[in-house]
């Protein structure tokens, strides 16, 4: 709606040759328009024009993120090393007679004689696009010998995780996302598996047993199927990658994270090495 500009009128009386002459002068108050900085003003783009370099076309990023993920023939092989003096694996003492018979030792930092570091999660954090379906096969977390087996693993969002108690003693599965409890349930001997799923890709779920405080495990919820966990000698392999450049993250529960950029082809395996120091 247009708003008319207010106007003010002034009148002057002039005496000329004995006659009175009235002169009217109209003064208009001009409407002030807001100023627009040409550098920040939205720029209209002609139909069919190509966006400037570095500018994604509308909907392109969303379409790429929602497109089906692609598998390829590329492979990354590598090793995780621990440098320096490896920490001693101290014996664990417990009043639980079943667990006491397992001759348990600490497993936070497990270093092979050659320096390979076990239980490091290696995953692609950048470079993979699209969405991937959860595997039909279930993942398993087994409370066996009063420890979580495997200690570290990764699953896809929506993939079923079967949590078992193979021991002849009570365990309590208390899981955390950060400092927040995800679920907290007891599991008596002979009880069937608990089936759980996790939906938040990128999160690492921590498993603890409130009955046996040394029992710790981790389930990483990946955003793509390109991940691995280092073996006893520190080796790992990630396969089925399309050709491209990826950012890898190597995560250890106590020693933190390292990252590396790796270029993958579908002909020769790419190499990646991660070094961790101290404990």
Image (spheres, helix red, strand yellow):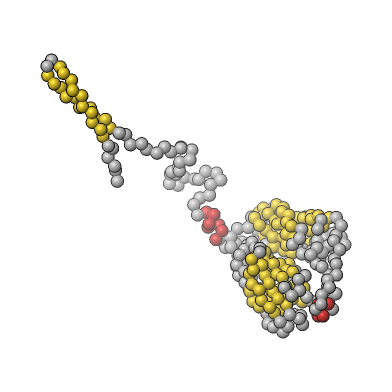
Q: Residue at x 82, y 68 (%)?
A: 106
State the image coordinates of residue 94 (x, y, percent, origin top left). Answer: 82, 75
Residue 169 horizontal side relative to residue 84, left or right: left
Q: Quadrant of residue 246?
A: bottom right
Report the quarter where the C terminus lies.
Answer: bottom right
List x then y, in percent, for residue 189.
73, 83
Residue 250 against residue 198 in the figure, above or below = above
Q: Is residue 175 visible?
A: yes
Q: Residue at x 64, y 66 (%)?
A: 180
From this viewpoint, which residue is outermost toward the left?
18
Q: Position of residue 226 (x, y in %)?
A: 67, 62
The front one of 266 and 84 is: 84
Q: Is residue 27 placed above or below 192 in the rendered structure?
A: above
In the image, residue 46 above or below residue 120? above
Q: Quadrant of residue 176?
A: bottom right
Q: Nearer the viewer, residue 259 or 279?
A: 279
Residue situated in front as seen by the camera: 171 or 13: 13
Q: Is residue 264 above or below residue 135?
A: above
- Residue nearest the observer in this picture, 15 or 89: 15
């Amino acid at each position: 709606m247009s708003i008319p500009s207010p106007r003010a009128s002034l009148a002057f009386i002039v005496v000329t040759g004995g006659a009175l002459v009235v002169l009217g002068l109209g003064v208009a108050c001009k409407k002030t328009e807001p100023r627009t900085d040409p550098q920040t003003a939205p720029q209209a783009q002609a139909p069919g024009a190509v966006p400037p370099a570095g500018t994604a076309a509308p909907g392109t990023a969303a379409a790429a993120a929602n497109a089906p993920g692609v598998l390829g023939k590329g492979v990354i092989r590598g090793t995780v090393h621990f440098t320096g003096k490896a920490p001693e694996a101290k014996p664990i003492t417990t009043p639980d007679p079943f667990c006491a018979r397992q001759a348990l030792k600490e497993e936070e930092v497990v270093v092979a004689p050659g320096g390979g570091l076990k239980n490091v999660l290696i995953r692609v954090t950048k470079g993979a696009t699209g969405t991937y379906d959860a595997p039909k096969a279930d993942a398993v977390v087994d409370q066996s010998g009063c420890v979580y087996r495997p200690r570290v693993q990764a699953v896809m969002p929506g993939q079923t995780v079967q949590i078992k108690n193979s021991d002849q003693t009570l365990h309590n599965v208390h899981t955390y996302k950060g400092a927040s409890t995800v679920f907290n349930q007891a599991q008596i001997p002979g009880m069937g598996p608990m089936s759980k799923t996790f939906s938040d890709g990128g999160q690492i779920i921590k498993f603890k047993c409130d009955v046996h405080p040394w029992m710790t495990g981790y389930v990483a919820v990946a955003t793509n199927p390109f991940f691995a966990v280092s073996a006893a000698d520190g080796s790992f392999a990630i396969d089925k990658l399309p050709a491209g450049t990826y950012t890898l993250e190597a995560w250890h529960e106590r020693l933190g994270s390292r990252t590396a950029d790796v270029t993958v082809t579908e002909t020769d395996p790419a190499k990646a090495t991660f070094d961790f120091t101290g404990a």
